[in-house]
Image (cartoon, rainbow, N blue to C red):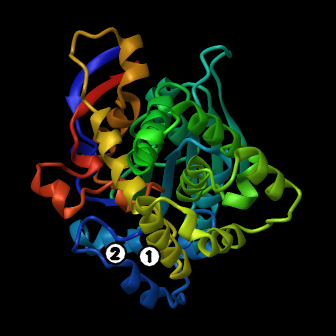
Amino acid sequence: MQLYGRSTISEFLGNNIAYRSLNPFDTRLPSLEELRASVRIPNQGVPRKTSADYASLISHLLKRARTLKAPRTKITQLIFIGDTRLNDATAFNNICAAGDWPGLAFICEENPQEHPFAEILKKEENRIIYIANRWDLLNKFDQLLDKHDFAVDERTAIILDLDKTCIGARGRNDKVINQARVDAAFKTVGKLIGDNFDAEAFEDSYSLFHTSNFHEFTTDNQDYLVYMCLIVSTGLYTKEQLADEILSRRIFRFDSFLLDVDQRANKLPSSVREIHQDFFSRVKQGDPTPFKAFRAQEFLSTVALMGNLDDDVPIETMLTQEIVITQEVRNRAVDWNRRGALLFGLSDKPDEASVPTAEFASQGYLPLHQVETHVVGE
């Protein structure tokens, strides 16, 4: 493993980026609202990554993006580079189906304890999904493409997952991305609770509710999770009481919990009451990221862990203390750009945690894909 200097995601993706809102960063491309109208999908919030609606929107977005540089070129195949077997594999299959494209996916979670492998997880018609346990196997990815008669050129669309693929490679560097989110949760709740904040008790609550036992209740939504821990930190519930209420299904839905808190909001500290009212209102409006203060802090915490170390820091230290760009992904992307392929980056991270607010932008903060950090890889 070695250092390859510093760079940004935008070096190889430019502004071909869409975060959670699915509003492309390149304003020449259609917004989510315009995409919906084009593919005739009703406005029912932002579709999740594994849904058919998501695939329809992304396939149309890729076609529109291709026209910007190659207006007479039709996309004929898809390559997908990601890090999660379920979500990324499902999204890949759905997008191929929506675009009527053959495709090949490479999904990796590094595990240096295992013998290196890249093997077919699923082969269905003209769609092939490879899983791997080393990111450096991307250096031999062209051999896999040749094996299946994939020639990368202007007719190829390539989706790069951002989080834990382009940066914070899963199994190698992803814990630093997780740490940024946890740090943001601590700082957000700590500011709201003030001097009475018990960091150890908050950590216990966060660890408890951030398990699969409660994913159905929170829908694995970090905003909901941090809000729950905030309410526990005020003493309105104990973590044991809330856990018992959820697991026994006396409180079986998050909105039921939220309504109960609202009915007792007069018992909350004034600073928390104000946050609760904003959170409650946004949930009722269908906002998937209602805890804006937390997401804004997550943005700051993430940026603080990008490019924060000196160049001479040992690689092992860098991988545990800084969010770095994955050299193997970058190397392939630079080569594919040279061959004329369309590269597009997708992230499930909310825009509020990825793009600076107007206030932050005025202070010189940049979107995550434009933030310089170290590049590390084999």
Q: Position of residue 181 (x, y in %)?
A: 46, 42
Element at label 2: helix
Q: Which residue is found at the position 41% from the left and 39% from the top?
A: 195
Q: Is residue 8 left or right of residue 241?
A: left
> Hey, which quadrant is residue 252 in on the image?
bottom right
Element at label 1: helix
Which quarter of the rendered picture does the N terminus lie within?
A: top left
Asked whether 66 or 233 is in front, the reply is 233
Check disc 1 and report the residue beneath it. Answer: 60
Q: Position of residue 210 (x, y in %)?
A: 66, 44
Residue 8 numbered mark, or none? none
Q: Amino acid at mark 2?
A: Arg
Distance from disc 2 to disc 1, alpha carbons, whole Å, reads: 6 Å
Q: Residues within 10 Å of mark 2 (few under 14, many from 20)?
A: some
Residue 64 numbered mark, or none? 2
> Hey, which quadrant is residue 250 in on the image?
bottom right
Q: Is residue 167 left or right of residue 132?
A: left
Q: Amino acid at mark 1?
A: His
> Hey, which quadrant is residue 87 in on the image?
bottom right
Asked whether 210 or 135 is in front, the reply is 210
Instruction: Tell whether label 1 touches label 2 (CB within 8 Å).
Output: yes
Q: Which residue is found at the position 44% from the left and 76% from the top?
A: 60
Q: Position of residue 265 (x, y in %)?
A: 56, 69
- For residue 300, above or below residue 27: above
Asked whether 262 or 219 is in front, the reply is 262
Q: Position of residue 69 (x, y in %)?
A: 22, 66
- For residue 140, above or below residue 277: above
Asked whether the viewer can see residue 1, the reply is no
- For residue 208, above or below residue 219: above
Q: Which residue is found at the position 40% from the left and 40% from the top?
A: 166
Q: Residue furthest front?
A: 267
